[in-house]
Image (tube, helix red, strand yellow):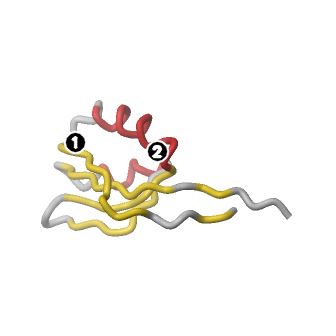
């Protein structure tokens, strides 16, 4: 049995329209919480993919700001 350790990073995304939440599946972002009144969401993604995801999301006009979470995510084995 082979166990692959995946390092994850928490992410906070501030958006202008809640339609953005539906499009985040293609970026492999697992959404944990959505606050539509405050217009932000929290989730997590693989740490090695974070820079690529951040670059692609900056081009989206419906996203105002992207921040990394200060809380470290536990590593999981697959």
Per the rendering, the mark at residue 27 is 2
In the picture, measured across the screen, residue 29 lies left or right of residue 54, that is: right
In the figure, 40 relative to 49: above or below?
Answer: below
In the picture, measured across the screen, residue 23 lies left or right of residue 49, that is: left
Q: Position of residue 8 (x, y in %)?
A: 49, 56
Assess disc 2: are there few (<14), some (14-19) or many (≥20) residues with their C-alpha within 10 Å of its C-alpha. some
Q: Position of residue 19 (x, y in %)?
A: 29, 52
Q: Are marks 1 and 2 in contact (CB under 8 Å)?
A: no
In the figure, 77 relative to 59: above or below?
Answer: below
Q: Position of residue 55 (x, y in %)?
A: 36, 32
Quadrant position of residue 3: bottom right
- Quarter placement of the C terminus: bottom right
In the figure, 15 relative to 62: above or below?
Answer: below
Question: Residue at image x 18%, y 43%?
Answer: 64
Q: Residue furthest left?
A: 37
Q: Which of disc 2 and disc 1 is earlier in sequence?
A: 2
- Quarter placement of the N terminus: bottom right
Mark 1 secondary-structure assignment: loop
Viewer-closest of 31 and 11: 11
Mark nearest the camera among 1 and 2 is: 2
Mark 2 secondary-structure assignment: helix
Question: Residue at image x 27%, y 52%?
Answer: 13
Viewer-closest of 63 and 66: 66
Quadrant position of residue 36: bottom left
Q: Which residue is mark 1?
A: 62
Assess disc 1: are there few (<14), some (14-19) or many (≥20) residues with their C-alpha within 10 Å of its C-alpha. some
Q: Residue furthest right?
A: 1
């Amino acid at each position: 049995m082979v166990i692959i350790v995946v390092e994850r990073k928490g992410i906070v995304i501030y958006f202008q329209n809640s339609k953005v939440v539906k499009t985040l599946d293609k970026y492999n972002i697992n959404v944990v919480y959505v606050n539509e009144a405050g217009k932000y969401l929290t989730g997590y993604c693989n740490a090695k993919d974070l820079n690529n995801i951040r670059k692609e999301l900056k081009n989206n006009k419906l996203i105002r700001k992207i921040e990394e979470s200060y809380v470290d995510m536990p590593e999981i084995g697959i």
